[in-house]
Image: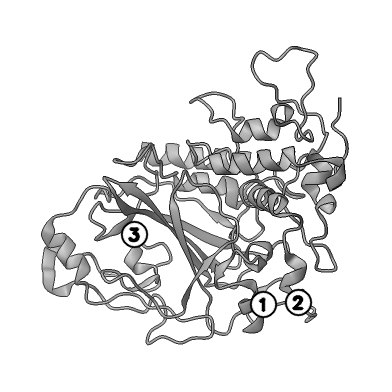
Amino acid sequence: MGRRLLQAAIASLLLASAGCSAKETPRTDGLPARDPLGAPSAAAATAARGAAAEPRGAGLGEHAGAAAGEHAGAGQGAAAQAPPPCKDGDTDPHDLRCTGLYSDLGARTIAAGVREFKPAFELWSDGAEKTRWIYLPPGSTIDVSRMNDWTFPVGTRLWKEFRLPVAGATRRIETRLLWKTAEDRWTRATYVWSEDGASALQVKAGVPEVPGTDGYAVPAQVDCIRCHAGKTDNPLGFEAIQLAAPEAGGLTYAELAQRGLLSTRSGGALPGADALQVPGSATERRALGLLHANCGVSCHHPIGVATHFEMRLDIDAAGRVGAVRDTRVYRTAINQPSKLRPPGAPPEARYYRLRPRDPDRSTLLRAMSRRDAPGAPPEQMPPLATRRVDEAGVAAVRAWIEAMTPAAGYPPAAP
């Protein structure tokens, strides 16, 4: 009881410090009795693969044989070794197989109505490969009246699977779930896969270091608030700019619009995908898209926790992103003085968030290029859930800084 009270207090402090809304449902109790990183017995793995029933979902205009959550018990013939049955109406399932992602977990068969999608610019996750899916209840639409901040229908579920090389083979590490269970409530859950890939059980406290990886950590569920609270409605990567770009895959903005899955309260016309493109040259697009996904959507935007320096690409009232010089990162970063200074910098030296053609005096690049020591003041970017520098991302932003010439429309470097 004492441990639960302590964890609840920590969760409350995180909520207060991150400016979280009532739409968050942090998980604060302890680890499951069974460690999902430990391989189960052969009998348990067989029972899990042979579970008699899996939850099925229907959505995006499709219908399955049973709605999500309406499923029978599993593994009846395996007695003590079988996984427990899924509970009807359970919106915080202990087992990934009960969330509606798979119709058959053993065969990795995705349930009817669940669609894969790929955002154009991905959040850095220490090199993990990721796959994402979304389920929308049948007959529902996403309210895009605020094009920068979509509102999802109750019943929406999103999953994100993370994979890493372990002992020479790619292995599933974790799958995260976001489930809108009421108008004012999202439930989050993190499922960690067993070493043999037979099961994935919910872990609330995270895993400080996944065995066999290069220091990869599964964050505690309460930590997810710090990024997801940056949206009025929780999802981060399922949004206009990410899904309209040509790099997007699976369920895209164009398909959502064509299938009538996007709506506005006014009933007005939706902007075309062409108007939502990340502006600029290939070099500019790579950098702007990366900063949008890793920094802008969750924190650095007009109603985020870092409004002084904005990196979100915003869609204006006319449904356009505009040119590079119209972006908030251009206006709030280029030649703007920075308080961050590298160790040993002389007192008279001046540093800027972005200084054209001068990566060494651009502190945004320094924040991306570092990882904080335990207990040190947070200066790295992104600030959590990463222990390795995104070298490709750093190279993309460096190339953009070096290309900021007057001929390309940038001002001369500040003194």
Q: Nearer the viewer, residue 398 or 353?
A: 398
Does dot 2 land on a helix, a strand or a loop?
Answer: loop
Q: Are marks 1 and 2 in contact (CB under 8 Å)?
A: yes
Q: Quadrant of residue 143?
A: bottom right
**Residue 66, image x and y in percent?**
38, 84
Q: Is residue 165 visible?
A: yes
Of the residues shown, which amino acid type is indicated by label 3? His
Q: In this figure, which residue is indicated by the disc labeled 1?
A: 262
Q: Nearer the viewer, residue 106 or 26?
A: 106
Q: Is residue 390 visible?
A: no
Q: In this figure, which residue is indicated by the disc labeled 3?
A: 94
Q: Earlier in the sequence, mark 1 or mark 3?
A: 3
Question: Is residue 99 shown above or below 15?
Answer: below
336 sits to left or right of 58:
right
Label ID, residue 270: 2
Q: Earlier in the sequence, mark 1 or mark 2?
A: 1
Label ID, residue 169: none
91 sits to left or right of 71:
right
Does dot 3 land on a helix, a strand or a loop?
Answer: loop
Question: Is residue 9 shown above or below 245?
Answer: above
Q: Earlier in the sequence, mark 3 or mark 2?
A: 3
